[in-house]
Amino acid sequence: LFGGLGAVFGLAAAAVFALACPFFEGCAGQEETAESMVSIPRDDVTTAPTAPGEAAETPSEPIEQQVENAVSSYRFSMEDYSRIHVPLKEMAAEADKGIVTVHSVRHETDWFNNPVENTGYFAGALIAQTSTEYLILTTEDAVEEADAIRVTFADGTEAAGTRKQTDRVSGMSIISVSRSAVSQETAARVEILTLGNSYQMKMGDLVLAIGSPMGIVHSVDYGSVGYVARSVPVTDGSIRVMYADVEGNAPMGTFLLNLSGEIVGMVADGYAGPGSQDVTTAVGISDYKGIIERMSNGLPTAWLGIQGQDITAEMEEQDLPAGIYITGVAEGSPAYDAGIQNGDILVKLNEGEVHTVKELQTRIENLEAGTTVRITVDRNGIEEYRELEYQVTLGAR
């Protein structure tokens, strides 16, 4: 009798295990997938409000006057300058642990058809780690036409890297290095650099340039932000650009840090205006956090292919429709192929109205490449604007 009951209970237990096993395996798989995904919080463009219960202090005289009075009455010594630079040097040394050398290897042949290996050297910043990989932010030049990628960490350890994703519009790339290829000793020395809030950067703020500011990986420079250009139009959005008096090499990879040691900018060419060619320009990192997150997860960013500017209240008073005035359409882009033109005013994306370039940028970043959307524009006719609709299949940047 007891033997029969034991057999029955055994069969029941086996059946329960068989039914539950796929469930637990699925949960484990979901947990592993969640751990391997990267999530980057977005920054608010507006300035952070004063903390509750904390009143803003109003000085008895302008702060500029207070600083001028203090500086003019104080005689600086060499020890003072040394004390100022020591914290900057310490921060640079700590941040440099998060900088890697990216070797872009290309296999070619010489005149006698002998195999030749050419290697380019670029700087990359370790910005995230998952349960399976390290993720490195670098330039498109570092991976363009590379037959192989090797990554050298700050302690000299070398590991194979793979291109995770590239955004050709911004010129940024993400490289992945398997954690299994990195020893525990190297992993303990690795510094993951935080992506900071570039919307908080102001004129006069001190910055630290790391990566390849001097054209050599692991070089460093100090300086300050001389100017911040807001709402600079770029493809499918707008960004902030910082002008700084530091050295910067855009193709090799140069990153700007704030005084908290966070990445707030990435040096980029093409933003210096007439008379400012010798100034280093860096795009604010906050404007690219959505794109960097997608690249870190191996996903391309959707591409419409327009540049535009917000229709202001003054422009609306001149009978212009509310929306985005399109100032440029990239040749060969989805918008160009659909028939959207310069001078059109984009008023809707699918069913939702679009009022600002920043709003359009966020909505496109949240769409998948290959998605077909309905773009509504107002086009200026002989006597009035007429509404046109286009079905546009978004490309990949």
Image (cartoon, grey):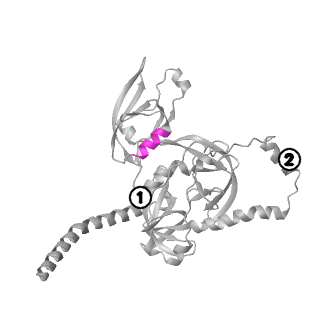
Residue 212, can we see it? no
Name the mark nearer the viewer: 1 or 2: 2
Q: Is residue 335 magenta?
A: no
Between disc 1 and disc 2, whose residue precedes?
2
Say which residue label 2 marks: 69
| Nearer to the camera, 373 or 390 | 373
- What secondary structure is the stretch in magenta mostly built from? helix
In the depicted structure, whether residue 292 falls above or below residue 26? above
- List x then y, in percent, for residue 49: 61, 43
In this view, 140 is above or below 315 = below
Residue 76 located left or right of residue 168: right
In magenta stretch: residue 361: yes
Q: Residue at x 54, y 26 (%)?
A: 313
Which quadrant: the N terminus?
A: bottom left
Task: Please say if 261 is above or below 113.
Answer: above
Q: Quadrant of residue 392?
A: top left
* Element type where label 1 sits in the image: loop
Residue at 83% x, 46% y: name it: 68
What stretch of residues is rendered in magenta?
358-366
Please give the name of the residue rendered at 64% of the width and 62% of the height, measured from the top-left corner.
Answer: 214
Q: Amino acid at mark 2?
A: Asn
- Looking at the rendered structure, which numbered label has been put on residue 297? 1
